[in-house]
Image: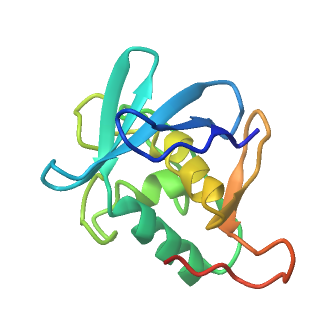
Amino acid sequence: MEAMHGGGGTIADPWELETPDRIHRYRMRIDDEREPPALICTVGVESFGYQLRCVSDLYEMLVDRGGWVELGVKDEKGLPAEDTVEAWARSPDNPVGDWYGLKPGRRGQFASYVPPLLEFFGLAEVEHKLTGNRMRVGRHPMSGGLIVPP
């Protein structure tokens, strides 16, 4: 199950999602009053965030790559493998030139929490194995064509 509840992405009605390995459930919402605007992720009682622009930036990276990209999930202390979503989310070469994560100690694991949101919106396909998951640009199930974000 990619998303348990559609939600509106608000405090009162967050998106309820699962990590790609389907082990952890979490909630995600938008905080557009924060500077920069953020995606706030809540796992259990802990909350942390990523810059909101990461959604469109990740989508554009997937379009540029044109195929499957390894997720490469790592916590902040771990060094992600090259050419993975996690490495891209920390790279000086990404659009923000640094980490997308906002809370020191929880800036990693981008590849666990952001890809399922893109999948929920049909912007990406995400594999759901216990390890070694990948993602790519979403394809409309009826036409086989690329889904273009609004």
Front-most of residues 58 and 148 = 148
The residue positioned 41% from the left and 70% from the top of the image is: 57
In the rendered image, the residue lying farthest to the top is 45
17 or 71: nearer the eye? 17
Q: Is residue 106 visible?
A: no
Q: How many marks?
A: 0
**Which residue occupies the extreme left position in the image?**
35
In this image, 18 relative to 140: left or right? left
Q: Is residue 63 visible?
A: yes
Residue plotted at (87% across, 77% down): 142
Residue 6 is drawn in which quadrant?
top right
- Asked if 140 appears above or below 101 in the picture, the reply is below
> At 77% across and 43% down in the image, what residue appears?
128
x and y percent of residue 129 in the render? 80, 39
Residue 25 horizontal side relative to residue 37, left or right: right
In the rendering, at what x and y percent does residue 36 appear? 17, 56
Task: Please name whichever residue, 113 or 132, is drawn nearer the observer in this view of the structure.
Answer: 113
Q: At which x and y percent is residue 119?
A: 64, 56
> Looking at the image, what colour scheme do you see?
rainbow
Residue 1 location (% of width, % of height): 76, 38
**11 or 69, which is in the foreground?**
11
- What residue occupies the far right of the structure in this picture? 142
Q: Is residue 2 above or below residue 130?
A: below
Asked where in the image residue 91 lies, by quadrant, the reply is bottom left
